[in-house]
Image: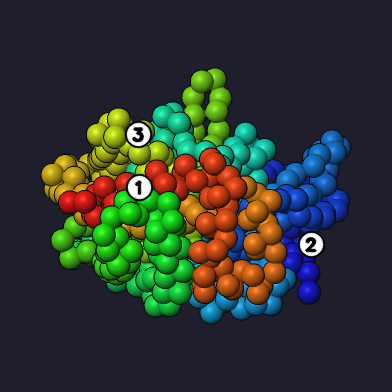
Amino acid sequence: MDLLNEKEVKSVVEQYGNFDLLDFKITNYSETLIGYLGKHLKLVANVNANGRLAELKFFVKCLPKDKWIAQFLMESGFFRKEFTMLSVLFNQFERNEDECKWRPKALLLKEYVFVFEDVKELGYAMANQKSTLNYNETMAVVQTLARFHAQSFIYEEKKSLELQKPYRIWDDFSEYLQEPKNKDWRNAGRNAAIEFLKVFSKHRWEPLFSEKVTNLFHLLFDDAFDLMRPSTKYRNTVVHRDLWSNNILLKNENGECGALIIDFQTVLYCPPTMDLSSLIYMNTAKSFRDKHIGEILDFYYKVLSKEVEDKIGIDFATILSMNEFMESYDESVLFGLTQAAIVIPITAMKVEERERLFCDSESIHRINNVSRTKEVIHVANEDAEYYSRLIDLFEDILDKYYLR
């Protein structure tokens, strides 16, 4: 069965103007691996615009052909989550104005096929996976993240006013905003981090280090997992949860940097600082964080406050005060660190290495759900840049929790 029929492609094209569809084709979007939870394709439509021939390009995301991966995505509910967010909840959020755009525009949504504008045509490109974000890039993504989180507050406040009673997104979407109970992926990442430290940590010669670091990481990861639930202490928003480089698109134009976020398959309903901390720890180095963290937090809160206050006209501090925000961020650091410890050992690998490891369903299953320790340690021994990225992150965890 075709992914898209002529009628559906026409509906996409018509959103760009009064065009007559001549023909279309669907090809691979890239020759290299650009994501793990879906297949990425390019839709090219040839159109007639009042006698002028033109070519329109779009981005398509769908289930992969590999039966095991497709089955995993269906059973995990990841595609269903994103479909519901894009087609229902996000569709009720404030419309994306060009000046406050935080995600690509969705043009056609079917249960397992999504068509988006191809923002590559607008100058956006994926963040560099091998290196961390620079200052301008970090602040651009922080601004976009604040705009995304603001949508939840705005929606809930307006809905509460309409219903004349407190309303929370969790009331209607709790089914789609929970973490899967299976911890295999997290456990595989945790165990790889433990074994990495046993081999490379500067503390590895200390008495009982192996036992202590194992016990510590089990406790930290369990506590971090508990944070992925709605807070009873702070206001919650829809959070992305997976803000690594592949889910960040950047655009540099006239000295200005802009950012979009993509892939909402793992969304949760938690304090927004969960996203902020994971964004920071997955995409910056310790030296950068030590230098700029105060400025980053102030900027995020300023943008978030302004977005909400401009739309609903109330003092944002009555929703989330600066003190509450700072307390919430401090508590969310554990999530950011552990999430980065799971994700970075895979994403910081060279593209060729990742493609080799994710070449078939058997390899993907083993790396994701059984063990990736051997691969992580091997690459660290062969790739100095990769080793530096990991040791910088893992030693930061030890500095914060092992040595206190």
Q: Residue at x 31, y 31 (%)?
A: 292
> Which SS class for mark 1?
loop
The span from disc 1 to disc 3 (Cα, nearest Å) is 18 Å
> Which SS class for mark 2?
helix
Residue in the foreground of this view, choosing between 10 and 383: 383
The residue tagged 1 is 202
The span from disc 2 to disc 3 (Cα, nearest Å) is 53 Å
Q: State which quarter of the image contains the N terminus.
A: bottom right
Pointer 1 or 2: first along the chain: 2
Dot 3 amino acid type: Ser
**Residue 128 position in % (x across, y down):** 56, 40
Q: Is residue 146 above or below residue 66?
A: above
The span from disc 1 to disc 2 (Cα, nearest Å) is 61 Å
Q: Is residue 193 above or below residue 55?
A: below
Disc 2 or disc 3, which is closer to the eye?
Answer: 3
Disc 1 or disc 3, which is closer to the eye?
Answer: 1
**Left or right: 232, with 47 as reference point:** left
**Residue 53 position in % (x across, y down):** 85, 39
The residue tagged 2 is 6
Residue in the foreground of this view, choosing between 324 and 83: 324
**Discs 1, 2 touching: Cβ within 8 Å:** no
The residue tagged 3 is 287
